Image (cartoon, coloured by chain):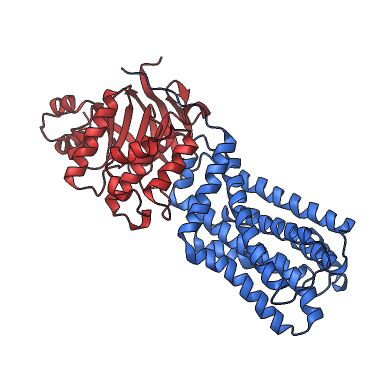
Amino acid sequence: MMSSAVSVADLRVVRGGREVLHGLTFEVPRGSIVGLLGPSGCGKTTLIRSVVGVQIVKGGTVTVLGQPAGAPGLRTKVGYSTQIPAVYADLTVQENLRYFASVLGAPKGDADRVITEVGLEDARRQVATSLSGGQLSRASLAIALLGTPEVIALDEPTVGLDPVLRQELWKLFYELAARGTTLLVSSHVMDEAAKCHRLLFIRDGYILADDTPQALRARTGSEDLEEAFLRLISERQVPA
Amino acid sequence: MTTVLALPRPRHGAITLATARRILVQLRHDHRTVGLLIGVPTLLMILLRYVFDAPGAFDRIGPMLLGIFPFVVMFIVTSIGTLRERTSGTLERLMTTPLGKLDLLLGYALAFGVLALVQVAVVLTISMTWLGMNVPGPLWALVLVAVLTALLGMALGLFASAFARTEFQAVQFMPALVLPQTLLCGLFVPRDQMSTALQWISNVLPLSYVVEAMHQLTGNSTPTATLYRDMIIIAVCALLALVLGAATLRRRTD
């Protein structure tokens, strides 16, 4: 079955002797933007790490583009940006991107392309330590775009960005999705939830809801997604 | 839906070279570290020359230290450098790319090998001209032993960094792994004057062979069989540490 870009079945992850993901099952359709929403510590980062294949998992399966997550064949097809900007602090933006481009075997000029896509043209010769927090996270995001991957997993990509930049990045995400790229984006900001095609509400390592924003609003009878999240939590706690 | 073009699989040689270049560019941005890497051993050599203010003594001890300085410096720089890769998330990121573990390790080896060559060249030039160090053995062998030792220090640093969670811990590995070797390698007390138990320990520590190799160079004008044996031992130890270091790099972590 190749209809889903990412397909997760009964995923269990144990960290520090404690189960943090309790058998998650969901699908990410190709060419869609799926938001992972939930409070800090709910398991978003662990889930993203499982999808890109760097997390030791206890049980279940994670399939990406028809292959087990982390398979060698996926290493040029999956882009990943960590929550803490993972760039070399002592290299310039351009040097960072050129290095990762050559590791990925990305075409020449790809480094410059992604610098433009994240709007870092003016900072390309700046050493990463001298960048602002927002610039740094965009530099880190740019690395995930190198080589035009089919699936991009972004862990909190818009933290610390001003509203204008955030809007521009979302425009970029939509363009990528329109080209057939699948995006898995985590966030704890509810106003970003509405921008996603589908949402996974996660709390304490469980999926509270897996649906479109419209359907979630309709189901909970609330216009506000934050409100919807709260209603789903209380529904769970009150036995039917 | 548009089809996304698949990238050609990058060749490992190219990734290794890109990694070595990246590490050298990082160093180029860090003038002070490069200055210290080259300046500190040079300064220590000058100091040593005037502390042992007798020509014979400096000729004997100078070459030994020429091997030990790069070893210590490379150990520190690599253990901190790779620890930074681990803690900054760049290693995790690289582990999702086609980069192989050996690409990373050989990239480090290549970059620091070049650096070791520069370091040894500067220290050696000053030692042999200004400081008047006299080494009867061939120059190429002296440089080769020093560079191999630097690579050994680098490989051990890589390996040690896997057991450090913080930079505080990483710098403590230097005295823990390096100082005992310095004490037992025959620099302070000839190894045959040590107790049998200490000699045994000394026999399995790679730095002992560095000192022995340098001793061969100061005592003979042509390469001896012992010198070649020592070089092979140092190279094998470096390779072994590199393989152990590779084993500590994991694509998947907890």
| Residue B132, x across and y down, in percent | 74, 76
Left or right: where B8 falls relative to B147: left
| Residue B167, x across and y down, in percent | 50, 61
Identify the image quadrant of the C terminus of chain A. top left
Chain B colour?
Answer: blue
Left or right: where A91 falls relative to A33: right
Chain A colour?
Answer: red
Residue placed furthest toward the front: B129
Q: From this view, report whether residue B192 is shown above or below residue A235.
A: below
Q: From this view, report whether residue A211 is shown above or below residue B85.
A: above
Q: From this view, report whether residue A58 is shown above or below residue B32.
A: above
| Residue A30, x across and y down, in percent | 33, 21
Q: Can you tell which quarter of the image residue B143 is in?
A: bottom right
Q: Using the image as rendered, state which of residue B151 and residue B162 is in the foreground.
A: B151
Q: How many marks?
A: 0
Residue at 81%, 57% in the rendered image: B230
Q: Using the image as rendered, state which of residue A217 and residue A230 is in the foreground.
A: A217
Residue at 33%, 34% in the rendered image: A206
Q: Is residue A75 visible?
A: yes
Identify the image quadrant of the N terminus of chain A. top left
Q: Using the image as rendered, state which of residue A35 and residue B152 is in the foreground.
A: B152
Left or right: where B77 falls relative to A177: right
Left or right: where B70 falls relative to B91: right
Residue at 66%, 48% in the rendered image: B242
Residue placed furthest toward the top: A1
| Residue B118, x across and y down, in percent | 62, 60
